[in-house]
Amino acid sequence: MKKRLILLHWLNLALTGATLAIALGSLVPSELLPGISILALLLPLLMAPHAIALLFWLRFKPRKAINNVIGLAILAFPLMAQWPYARAQAIAEEEINVATYNVRAFYQTTAAAKDIGKWSQDQSIDILCMQEIRRSAAGPLAMYYPFRAYAPARKNYSVAIYSKYPIINSSPLLYSSLTQQGYSRTSAQYADIALPFDTVRIINVHLSSTGVQDQDMEVVHSRDELLEAGQFVLSKLASTDKNRGLQAKHIIDWVNESPHPVILSGDFNGVPGGNLYWRLLRHLDDPYIFNGYGTMGSFEPLARRGLFFKIDWTLHSPELHSRGQFIDNISLSDHRPLITRFSPEAPSLLEE
């Protein structure tokens, strides 16, 4: 028994060391070391080993459980930023709903734009930030929003902000450090919107796609096929990681330069827990951490396979008051929309 405890002790130290290494590695800017942010995907996998080890050591050697307490503490925020556990608060007066939604150019269904328009009204969406919008097909959705901004302004394929409140200023934003031309260089914008209780700057972004397609994750039939498919997907993730690192530097600057409180929304093609996320938390709040509820996972092809990653985010300046954030489980795109509820006043302690 003593020899087994010694072996388990060293295995536990290795687990804690791996957790620290992965957590610290995920903080390295991916423009410096492309592919490093993929480590953030591994953090949820370490929760179960730490939980099992904690229960074991509490039973046999309580003092040794400190390693697992440290490991679970490291994992807490990345997990809370992906997995909902809160309950929905009651709707407040003058509440504003902001949604971010990658609409996949309205190709998911034949009437996707019409169906998304109906959904937006059923959910009382006041501001809709979209990525991969095809403007030529957006008419049935655009009719509900009198104020609209696009980036690029004169391209059919773009990102867009639709608002029921006046847009008093707007502009496309450019990821100028990306050398290649095209959508990945121009897929960002801002719009200053006059809400009833404040003027806010909405920043809508779409970071470079991972390039992973649904067919890349099809079921394989042998160990060799599994390894080959895994290497192929990882190579795609790593090859676009540098671009997302370069885009991240621009996003930080845009947030810092804003003259108004910021609501940052978009498709980040990465999970909370990496370098960009931790840098943004120095300036913005993530309402999902303490007030996320509802469906898990915003990318439907992964969620369908039990991989509940939230790659669509909405963060906001601390002076704004959010009342909750949730992913709506609809299948009108390959993403699920993320909705954030804002109110003029902070929720009372009694409501919480």
Image (cartoon, rainbow, N blue to C red):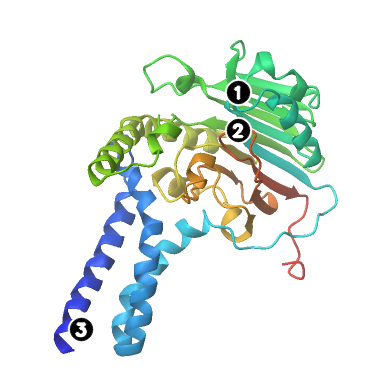
Q: Quick check: marks 3 and 2 in contact, CB under 8 Å?
A: no
Q: Residue furthest left?
A: 3
Residue type, label 3: Leu
Q: Nearer the viewer, mark 1 or mark 3?
A: 1
Q: Residue furthest front?
A: 221
Q: Residue at x 80, y 36 (%)?
A: 121
Quadrant where the N terminus sits is bottom left
Q: Residue at x 26, y 38 (%)?
A: 231
* Residue 204 % position (x, y): 59, 32
Provide the residue designation for mark 3.
5
Question: In terms of secondary structure, where does tag 3 sit?
Answer: helix
Q: Where is residue 36, by image quadrant?
A: top left
Say which mark, if any, is on residue 107.
Answer: 1
Question: In terms of secondary structure, where does tag 1 sit?
Answer: loop
Q: Where is residue 119, by image quadrant?
A: top right
Residue in front for this viewpoint, 94 or 89: 89
Provide the residue designation for mark 2.
333
In the image, is residue 164 above or below residue 65? Answer: above
Left or right of residue 107, residue 143 in this image: right
Residue type, label 1: Tyr
Q: Residue at x 45, y 34 (%)?
A: 214
Q: Report, in whole angstroms, how far the alpha carbon at label 2 lies from the one at label 1.
A: 8 Å
